[in-house]
Image (cartoon, grey):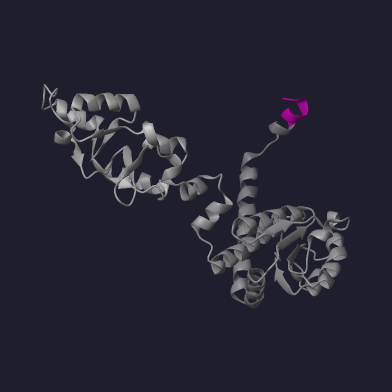
Amino acid sequence: MSENTAKITSFFDTKRALNLAAETLEIETAALNNLKKRLAGEDAAHFGKAAAMLLDCTGRIVVSGIGKSGHVARKIAATFASTGSPAMFVHPAEALHGDLGMITEQDVFIAISYSGEASELMSICPIIKRMGAKMIAMTGKPYSGLAQLSDVHLSIQVDKEACPLNLAPTASTTTTMALGDALAIAVLDARGFREDDFARSHPGGALGRRLLTLVSDVMRKGDAVPVVTADTLLREALFEITKKGMAMTAVVDENHRAIGVFTDGDLRRLLEKVQDFSRIRISEVMSKNPRTIGPGQLAAEAINIMEQYRINQLLVADTNGKLIGAVHIHDLTQAKVI
């Protein structure tokens, strides 16, 4: 620890820091409550018009801002993009030097500036309007330049910032972020966006894996599946179980339809009752009518069946009951579906 750091630490007042933290949360909560009241009152029509404009957008939602507003704009664009509305962030300064070409007349442009007078935005917004693109302004000043240029103005006004100096954007950026989320959720709902749509936008995430991974993607098939016929001796079936490493074997009829299953658990229970099983056939001790799942069903459904019946393996069969594979709980774990 440096000498300067040590001096600062020695004067640190934990109680004061906690009081400031509580005050910050109170100020930002009050700002959000005020936003909620405005949306239920004088700003309701503006919000509805903005949401409808975004829903009807045939191009992309382009969000822009400078400084802290720019950081918030990036997040809002990302939220729209991940919830079914093609969106992107454009830096206003870069737009002045070529990136304006990314914007088309089919787009809806969201300009974010608390003052409503950010010079970079004020330089590009008239051009965007001349293109024919619709424009939504999010500002804290309803009579600002951006507000006057926009097709819809949404207020992000706050009574004060959480910063003790009332300078650093804090409550205002929280309010802006929340308003952007509110718009995205309204559009998401109107668009009929559901879990499977979300999964397609997040294929690398846990939800994506659960909603996109099929049984056929994770099941074992061919020689990897332990299979015996009904007249197989139990001792021979045990060799098949050991060889294939699934702690079970499927039992099929002459048409390769799954008619039974025998697991390690069945063997342990059998050993408690029978000492000599050298002449026992698998059909005498197998569990009949085994649980099966189709290859086109979600792997998550396989998990639900396993949990419901407290089993670790599941046979995979086609619509005629023909065995085509098997899945073990470990297969689902390795595929990160669980």
Left-right relation of 36 to 136: left
Image vertical order of residue 245 relative to residue 89, above or below: above
x then y, percent, for residue 98: 87, 56
Can the viewer see residue 108?
yes
Residue pictured at 42% horizontal, 49% vertical: 298
x then y, percent, for residue 338: 43, 41
Quarter of the image with the N terminus is top right
Q: In which quarter of the image is residue 94?
A: bottom right
- For residue 157: magenta? no
Q: Quadrant of residue 155?
A: bottom right
x then y, percent, for residue 285: 16, 34
Image vertical order of residue 166 relative to residue 279, above or below: below
Residue pictured at 66% horizontal, 58% vertical: 177
The one of 48 and 179 positioned closer to us in this rendering: 48
Image vertical order of residue 206 relative to residue 228, above or below: below
Residue pictured at 39% horizontal, 47% vertical: 295
Can the viewer see residue 31?
no
Image vertical order of residue 177 relative to residue 328, above or below: below
**Which region shows up in magenta?**
1-7
The one of 123 and 84 positioned closer to us in this rendering: 84
- For residue 2: magenta? yes
x then y, percent, for residue 325: 36, 40
* Magenta-colored segment: predominant secondary structure: helix
The one of 103 and 245 positioned closer to us in this rendering: 245
Left-right relation of 180 to 188: right
